[in-house]
Image: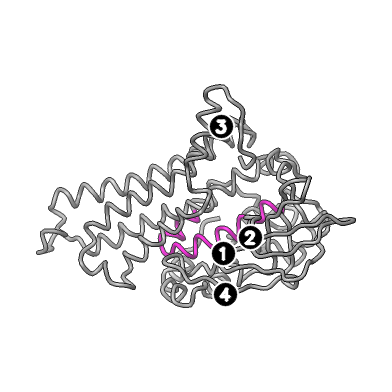
Amino acid sequence: MAISAATLDLVAARGDEGRKARRLADDVVKALIADGFFRHFTPAAYGGSEGRPQDFFLDQIAIAERDMSTAWALGIVAVHNYQIAMMDPRTQAEVFADGPDALISSSYNPVGAKAEKVDGGVMLSGRWGWSSGSLHCNWVLLGGVIPEEGYRTFLVPQKDYRIEDTWYTMGLQGTGSNDIVIDEPVFVPDHHTHRQMDGFNGVHHQGPGIYDLPWAQVFIRVVNTSAIGAVRHAITLMRERVGLGSTDMTKSATDPDVLDRIARASILAEEAAAVMVRAYDEMEAVGWKPSLLDRARYRYQASLVGDRCIEAMDLLMDIAGGRSVYAGNAFQDLWHDVRMARAHVANNPVGFARNYANMLMGGENKDLFL
């Protein structure tokens, strides 16, 4: 389901407001609910679309062309309904009881978590950072390690956690990626948890189809695809700065260096988008059950998007003009947004390159989030 032109216009109009408020405008969230963005990965049994990943991420790019913070935060919120669809049927019924447009934030890094196994579940407490869009959500998915059992994701209702305002950053300000805090241990029943190996093996309770795709193959794209839209946005801004009638030869559309940089920046973004779509087309062609080697390749490809988009933004920044050095300049804001995205652990390609190359040489997979 494509995002409506009216919603995209609203996203663009509210971008600066969200950056200043350090959270997204409520009417933007409501408009995307109305467009069906959050139900894309919700099972059809609960009124969802059970949509294809490539369609979802093309929508995320379109949103990011207007405002990267909106695309980043609400893309992450929306993608969680795929993980919920892989969890216990009781959990799905509870989360989607009020409709298919569940709003769930997350923070998967377990470093600040304490998880103690008890009868029927886990007692969970701690602090988690970077929970994008959390101010608009009534659930959160939190990462933690249970001693002697390993990593799990824990689904926690809003009443059991608080949001601490910590989001003072150089970019992506509108995402409102504040901290989630559970001061005193809360009980999380086992059916509200998702084991890492279940996500890795594509274990779910739906029929054959899209949910056969391992969870990581959906999530790893949501934290970099919005950067593609940001580069497209930057090129739109460049069109306004560089015109055939410009008298500034450093910004003239007749200058070969200017034209070369714009062309290279555009192709970097378009190639990243094309690789993403092709990857999901390949997964669809094999019934959403790609080989382990292909899964490693797809993860490595996804991790490269941040570097490609930084390269594109750097090409453009050098010809953006003197006004771009001032705080609040739209072009500088985009430059910072893309660099912020690269800070996500999933966008550091070094480890993923090593794992993929090792597998190409006949070695064993070392990554459980593929």
- Which badge, 3 or 2, is on the more N-terminal residue? 2
Estimate how packed mark 2 is, as few (under 14), some (14 to 19) or many (20 or more) residues with alpha carbons within 10 Å: many
Measure the alpha-carbon separation of dots 1 and 4: 12 Å
Marking on residue 106 = 2
Q: The residue under label 4 is which amino acid type?
A: Asp
Residue segment shown in magenta? 59-84
Q: Position of residue 177 (x, y in %)?
A: 55, 66
- Which badge, 1 or 2, is on the more N-terminal residue? 2
Is 18 situated above or below 315? below
Left or right position of 4 against 245:
right
Measure the alpha-carbon separation of dots 2 and 4: 15 Å
Q: Position of residue 84 (x, y in %)?
A: 71, 54
Which is nearer the eye, 145 or 46? 145
Estimate how packed mark 4 is, as few (under 14), some (14 to 19) or many (20 or more) residues with alpha carbons within 10 Å: few
Q: State yes or no: residue 61 in magenta.
A: yes
Q: The residue under label 2 is which amino acid type?
A: Ser
Left or right position of 202 against 178:
right
Measure the alpha-carbon separation of dots 4 and 3: 40 Å
Name the residue tied to disc 3.
Answer: 294
Measure the alpha-carbon separation of dots 3 and 1: 29 Å
Name the quadrant of the N terminus. bottom right
Marking on residue 132 = 1
Left or right position of 122 against 41:
right
Q: Nearer the viewer, mark 2 or mark 4?
A: 4
Name the quadrant of the C terminus. top right
Name the residue tied to disc 4.
Answer: 165
- Which badge, 1 or 4, is on the more N-terminal residue? 1
Q: Quadrant of residue 90?
A: bottom right
- Which badge, 3 or 1, is on the more N-terminal residue? 1
